[in-house]
Image: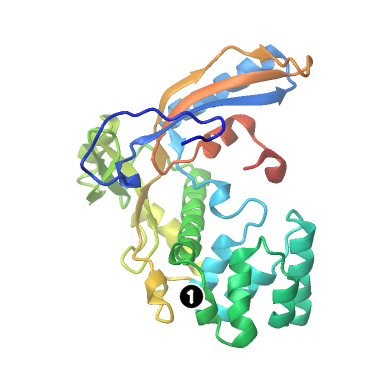
Amino acid sequence: MRIEDIALYPLGYSDRKISSRLLLGNQFHTIVRGVSHASAVIRGRIANVQRELSEAGGLPNFFGHQRFGTIRPITHQVGRLLVEEDLEKAALTFLAEPSPHEHPESREARQKLQDAGDFKEALRSFPRFLKYERWMLTHLAKQPRDFCGAFRRLPLKLRRLFVQACQSHLFNRFLSQRIRKGLPLNKAQSGDYAIELDSHGLPTSHIKQATAQSLPSLQKAMDENTMRIAAPLIGFEQGPSDGVQGEIEREILEAQNLSPEEFKIPSMPEISAPGRLRTIQAPIINHSIEELSEEQTSPFTQAVNLGFTLNRGSYATVLLREYMKPQELIEAGF
């Protein structure tokens, strides 16, 4: 196999099928370029971020911006509408919601569909590279009210991704509000969920819920890195936490007018989401900051080399945001 800029090396043999569940984590070596601050300022800011992450006990385990779409962040919106079973609005959001950051041809085609509501004309005007949209439009051009059938022209994995993005967005809201309220990520509160970790530090299926009586033993396990606090990816089998964290989650669900039971979707049961727990913190393994280097192409800027490993399911872009604090998501790419 020949892939540009990628080298593959055999590690060994196994009689088990290769699966993402076998992945322990991902190792990253990244270069942040175009840093225009003085060296002393850069080192000071790096030290501050490292101190904050160390005091927190790790990285807040947010889902990265790309989970929702960087150029056109509507994935979670479509998912929420599917959960609410407003299939027509979900379809039109996916097909006809333009973004100022996407290709002009795509943006114009979406706007035209939004204005005219003509699926046959949209099929003629949507560019060929929007293949998923065109699959849906092919169906709607023939059956303009069968939005469920149109969604079923999409791969099952993509349809499930919409609902999962809705769950991820709620999780990010839960975690953000916990941080705003000053609740620690590595100190359990009564009502918090806690997940037992395996020998590699990955979450297992063993779950406990903190009570006033169990807090000391749970906290001891967390201090020994054998357990970690978790928050729900809401689903029809996974409700909110209890205690203060549960209050946060219920307030957000109420504001969003969503309930766990709605994630069982009668019109499309194959995309129903039972839910699960996700740790609210991710360990940063082998975290290193190499010496600053001056950019050869731009002598007035410097580059910072970052090295780290994250467990599977955690986003490198979330850690990079802690250092880079990007203001323009599109320009930064995350």
Q: Is residue 268 visible?
A: yes
The image shows residue 49 at horizontal and vertical percentages of 55, 26
Q: Residue at x 48, y 75 (%)?
A: 152
**Residue at label 1?**
152
Q: Answer with left or right where residue 160 lies relative to residue 36.
A: left
Q: Answer with left or right where residue 143 lies relative to residue 55.
A: right
Q: Is residue 144 visible?
A: no
Q: Quadrant of residue 103?
A: bottom right
Q: Name the quadrant of the C terminus.
A: top right
The image shows residue 76 at horizontal and vertical percentages of 55, 62
Q: Answer with left or right where residue 166 lies relative to residue 117.
A: left
The relative height of residue 210 versus residue 258 in the rendered view (above or below) is above
- Which amino acid type is shown beneath numbered disc 1? Arg
Report the label total. 1
The image shows residue 301 at horizontal and vertical percentages of 75, 18
Which residue is more in the foreground, 67 or 84? 67
The relative height of residue 168 versus residue 237 in the rendered view (above or below) is above
Element class at badge 1: loop
Q: Residue at x 40, y 81 (%)?
A: 266
Seen from this angle, which residue lies furthest front? 1
Q: Residue at x 67, y 52 (%)?
A: 71
